[in-house]
Image (cartoon, helix red, strand yellow):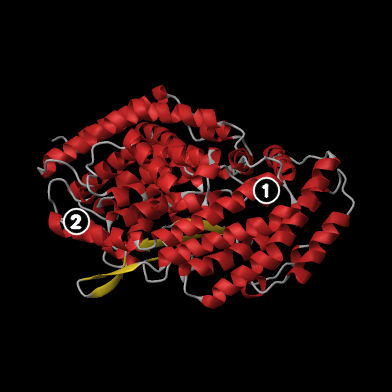
Amino acid sequence: MSTLVPSSTDELVQWTWPQIEPHYRELAARPLNAANVGAWLADWSRLEEAVNEMYNRLWVATTVNTADEEAGRRFAAYLDEIFPAAQAAEYGLKKKLIASGLKAEGFEVPLRNMRAEVELFHEANLPLLAEEKKLSTTFDKIVGAQTATWDGKEVTLQQLQPVFLDPDRAKRERAWRLSMERRLADREKINELWTQFLRVRTHIAENAGYDGDYRAYRWKQLLRFDYTPANCETFRRAIEEVAIPAGLRITERRRRRLGVGSLRPWDLNVDPLNRPPLRPFETIDELRGKTSAIFHRVDQQLGAHFDTMAREGLLDLDNRKNKAGGGYCTEFATARRPFIFMNAVGVHDDAQTLLHEGGHAFHVFESARLPYIQQKQVGLEFAEVASMGMELLAAPYLSMDHGGFYGEADAARARVEHLENAILFWPYMAVVDAFQHWVYQNPDDALDPAQCDAQWAALWKRFMHGVDWSALDDVLVTGWQRKGHIHQDPLYYVEYGLAQLGAVQVWRNALKDQAASVARYRRALSLGGTQPLPRLYEAAGAKFAFDAGTLREAVGLMEQAIAALDPE
């Protein structure tokens, strides 16, 4: 089978369904028994890797340049002609394996996942799933085209980020308002797209037999076997009890240091002691080089992984017009290589983002030895431990003494900002998570963007405290429009909150023994998706938890570290 798969990327992205389909047909027809199940799985894995990499190569091309019409056309053609047919063929092979009753070593969790996927499959959903991906590309185009004029130049909204670090409060406010005005200009476009997303998803759930209950459908699609929506509510209550009071201590300290009567949204990124903004790098080469040095200090092999990416052109780091927003790490499965995409503009958040996405990339490298692609399907709740854990494991090496970005004082300052932002993230995560649960429990109401605005505002008031949003109602209530996960990755966000809790536990262990903690981290990553979530957390030295007690211990450790790094 492997010799029939295209040998080069250029060939791979030109593959058509008539070229692909015979390979699926041969696997479906091949007798399956205990003697050949390993070889059959290996051939299936190579084929699925190729189809998966084809998708990712074509999708990446639409994100690195959202104005590339040819890339958009090729990706749309894939979604129309290959994606539905490949999904149907995959369904057939999953059914064949399940019906055989055969098992392979390390395949228990993938087999559990396959059973759920077979139960969800409905042929009528294939064009709808493709349509959902096209809507996601449209969202990227809307966001990627958002620019503003600043100091006489057209800039992307991401390129305004450094202004939010300027000590001049009036200048920050002007940039913030300009950015939000531009986003609000697309309010109706995003509202219209939102109703299309919801209708497609409701239809998908109905086809799959969930009577319009998209949340139940999506829960299974996300392969969430180890927790329930009720656990999410438990976690949100823990956040109210523990993280919100800690967040208020952080925002009050910021308000007091800035010497303002109340914190406004444009006061949240500037240094509260009016020190100049952290400038970790001037060029992308510098960002890449210093990040490599930090990774080598964490672990020599992890540093070597990152250097491989740099050498092979697997890092697209700079911000530019017509580039999709945000950052991600994806995998080119046949090549067994990750690809990192981000929008660096020279602020500390860029350095933090690359450390984060580096953790995802290391997951790809460390699990590459697993024989079957199905074993690499990792729950996002643990995939984010890989990334958030790496941010914390790398933090001690941010200083120039270790080849990093800053002098000792600024390195400590960056670590304080990171820990404070991590605590403040939990309440925001709770807003996004609760909003999405509301949407899919009340799909008819959520079709009305005005009701979405009202629900977002109510949740914001419940979880987000310490910042004055008076006279900014339009911006506040449309916050849900600016969170890409809500549109493109429904019900995907609680993973970040759970993983942050896991990552802090990995870091806790590193404070006692960095080398041992990193070894456990790498071991857990190497397991891919061969173990359930609680066991993956355990392998990394953490507990998969939702309770206030575990969160309180984590927040207490973080506040302790903040006090040590910032004695004043």
Q: Residue at x 16, y 60 (%)?
A: 171
Amino acid type shown at disc 2:
Glu
How packed mark 1 is, by other alpha carbons closer than 10 Å (few <14, some 14-19, many 20 or more), is many
Quarter of the rendering containing residue 316: bottom left
Q: Does the residue at mark 1 contact the one at mark 2 (Cβ under 8 Å)?
A: no
Residue nearest the viewer, comparing 436 with 252: 436
At mark 2, the secondary structure is helix
Quarter of the rendering containing residue 443: top right
Q: Which residue is mark 1?
A: 374
Where is residue 381? Give x, y as percent: 51, 40
Where is residue 268? Give x, y as percent: 23, 47
Residue 300 in sight in this render? no
Q: Give the left or right position of residue 7, taking residue 43 as reference.
A: left
Residue with the most extreme left position: 259
Q: Nearer the viewer, mark 1 or mark 2?
A: 2
Q: Quadrant of the N terminus?
A: bottom right
Q: Residue at x 68, y 61 (%)?
A: 83
Residue 215 to residue 172: above or below: above
How packed mark 2 is, by other alpha carbons closer than 10 Å (few <14, some 14-19, many 20 or more), is some
Q: Quadrant of the C terminus?
A: top left
Residue nearest the viewer, comparing 477 with 507: 477
Residue with the most extreme top position: 549
Q: Residue at x 49, y 32 (%)?
A: 232
Amino acid type shown at disc 1:
Gln
